[in-house]
Image (spheres, coloured by chain):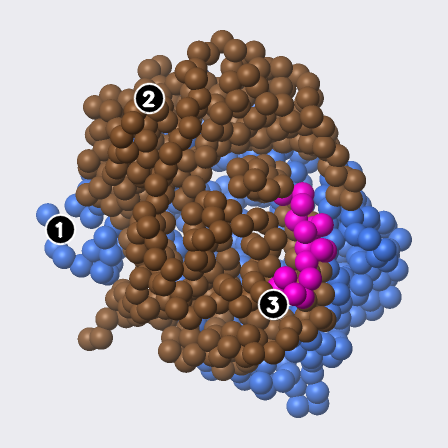
Amino acid sequence: MEIQHYEQIGETIYLETLNNGLKVYVLPKPDHNKTFSIFTTDYGSIDQAFTPLNSAETVQVPDGIAHFLEHKLFEDEDGDAFNTFSKRGAQTNAFTSFTRTAYLFSSTSEVQANLETLLDFVQSPYFTEETVEKEKGIIGQEINMYNDDADWRLFFGLLSSLYKENPVRIDIAGTVQSIDQITEDLLYTCYQTFYHPSNMVLFIVGPVDPQETVQLVRDNQEKKPFPEAGEIRRSYGDEPKESYERQKTIEMNVQTPKCLLGFKEPDDHYPHPGLSYELGVQLLLDVMFGPGSSTYEQLYKEGLIDNSFSADFTMERSFGFSAIGGDTKDPERLVSQLEETIHAFKQKPLQEEDIRTAKKRKIGAFLKQLNSPEFIATQFTRYEMNGDSLFAVVPTLEKMTLGDLESILQRHFHSDRSSVTKVVAPQS
Amino acid sequence: MAETEQLDAGGLRVHWQPSNKFKTTTIVLHIKAPLEAETAAARTLLAHVLQAGTADYPSRRKIRHFLDDLYGASFYADVGKKGENHVLTFVMEVASEQYLQNESPLLPKALTFLLSVLQSPNMTESGFSETIIKEEKQALTQRIRNIADDKTRYANIRMLEEMCADEPFGLHPFGSVADMEALGNDELQQAYEQMMASDQFDLFVTGPGSKEEILNVVEPAGEYFKTGERKQAKATPSQPPAEINEVVERQAIQQAKLHLGFRIPYTVDADEYTAVLVTNGIFGAYPHSKLFVNVREKESLAYYAASRYEPYKGILFAMAGIAPEQYEKASEIMQAQLEAIRNGEVTEEELTTTRQMLKNQILEQMDSARGAIEMNYQNVLSNNTRTVDERLHEIEDVDKETVIATAQKIQLDTIYLLTGEEETA
């Protein structure tokens, strides 16, 4: 077993890679009541075109199938995994993102039994025509709920403007029409390709013994046969460097208009450009638009933003984008102010003092996040799958120079790769 | 986590709970007054104006820069209701210096700042800064309007408005847009003086730190916080409805929101509180509950179907997001689940699963500083103080007969439906 000790933050992580390729991480937290475990596959909504295990040809599967599969795995021949967890007082859930699907539980008792259940329900797919059809009704309501959510529509409006080919432009749950094409055979194809243990990570945090925990997982896995791991070939289309559409307006009955300005990364440095790039864009967004910036103060004074305003950057396998904005009475004016700020920053050197305080803020925010076992487990897994380490955040921030940030600034915030999306009330 | 120790300074009640489980110290100041239509908007604006500037740091941006030096300590105001109390809350979270290189203790600096927000606001002889008032009114007015854009939240607020039309609990804690727009410096100063004179102040500190650090800051501040009688909310107990009130509202939406409001004569003060938690757990709080199993899993009518208990008021509500044409069917099935409990259709498995879930939830809550503070505040607000162990035992003691008897006390008051514009069959 590998042991990594992080002196400055006082945490120790144990890692074991099992024979079938599954990576198991344990972070003991002896003074906590709760154990949180998350079992994640490197497979999300954008993995729609791929070469299935033991096949030579690329298949194209319907939008929303990864999320559909997430729902269906909870069910097996004897019933529902929700019930098994509930009987032991454990809470369970799952989520599908663009690039990952994760299954999790938290509990304060019978942790070992819960851990077995987590491994077993994810590793025993069971779909019939009847159960697949029934799920379409439930997910149809989930999709309709999001269709009524103006912030969600704004966000996907921006992504479908920035991207022309990459499936990140498509809603994670798909549409009522696309999920209607899902069959149990397609679900099995996706499952067999992406749920091989070598494509998955298990992370456990809580008052547990690392040796015993790893042993339990090893015993569980050795009882189950898995085929040889094959290489998974995925395709995301040929994404142009420029944004697909520069402007988009969505009409919905909103009280106050909403607006986002976004920039996409050119895809010439994927699979992943590394943690320092991601942290770099985040620092720059904070310096330009964070609550301590002069732009934020000015926009707030003019009543162009309220506490819904945010500036975020997300980067995963095959895509990366920033999104800046929120509720505003005047989307045009807000966008022109945001663009002016970016332009001004690109014209003059960055200020040492601005960067120093932005780094301090980021370190403090990171320590706050480390109070949450859920955050540690989820984010550690995310960084791991992207080839980075969560605990490299602070050292990476400390090392970052003004020069690094200058070049990130010039590269990311490029007007050819930007889009603006608005949600406004229909003109009556 | 250690027991909470009470360190009072004048009228300021300080609840200190040391713990090295966290890498930051969480500070929460709750300021409580009765919830009233006349004062809700003014108190809300007051909290946001105080948050936007102090005498030492007279703007939002100056405050941000001060917080940056505390390693991006967070600081924000929040306004809510606990039953018929109106609660202004100021929250700070600050990193412990033991995880930083060469830093002096940050907790005393954070506490000093938080108290200065109340003791020395950005105020001159002519009152609060007119610029700040204007900015905060603008932002709050927009926030009140935008509530209508979050359909689930809007439906719940509307249901409570209809259900509690004649009770303070029907009020939104922010007040109305009209109330907010009418406010000026005079009303705000009055709200400030009123707050300092008669509100109840409870300061919670949880995380790494020492008692001495806290006492050094709060003791000298005690004189600002007057001791003596506090203004108490007039309790308006939940009355059983004369008849069921049915309200249908239409908007251009795809998914209908069905909210059922029930009355229950037990609040957090009652001995029956824990029995309500268990009954609500069987009814709709969890994935194994009757609502989820029947509305979602058996009938595929909804993605979410759940119930919540409002323990400071004695209200229970059930909600589901459904296709508009399924309204009557969904409403019947939801009501039938409660009827089933009243008729004794409660299995041993439902009961033990619910107990397990509730106990787990309480223990998990103690793993978060905010969770531990909320539990302590519940004890402060309630006449019925319960330790964690007592809570766990009480849950064990609720049996099937108690659940049936509790469910029989739950009465439907209001059916609220937010649905699409076109006529549905």
Q: Which mark is residue A406?
A: 3
Quadrant of image for the C terminus of chain A: bottom left
Of A232 and B30, nearer the camera is A232
Judge the density around disc 3: few (<14), some (14-19), many (≥20) Cα neighbours within 10 Å: some
Residue drawn 51% across the image and 64% down it:
A411
Image: B279 above or below B350: below
Q: Name the residue under label 1.
A: B424
Disc 2: host chain: A
Disc 1: host chain: B
Q: Is residue B395 in view from this perspective?
A: no
Q: Identify the colour of chain A in the image.
A: brown
Residue drawn 27% across the image and 42% down it:
A63
Q: Mark 2 points at which residue?
A: A54
Is B47 positioned to the left or the right of A326 in the image? right
Residue A396 part of the magenta-drawn span = yes
Say what secondary structure mark 3 lies in: helix
Say which amino acid is labelled 1. Answer: Thr
Q: Identify the colour of chain B in the image.
A: blue
- Residue B291, given in percent of the width and then of the height, sits at 34, 34
Which of the two labelled residues, at mark 2 and mark 3, occupies the earlier sequence position?
Answer: 2
Q: Are marks 2 and 1 in contact (CB under 8 Å)?
A: no
Q: Is residue B95 in view from this perspective?
A: yes
Residue drawn 28% across the image and 33% down it:
A58
Image: A397 above or below A326: above
Q: Bounds of the magenta span?
A: A390-405
Say what secondary structure mark 2 lies in: loop
Residue drawn 56% across the image and 11% down it:
A219
Task: Determine the CA span between mark 1 and mark 3.
Answer: 58 Å
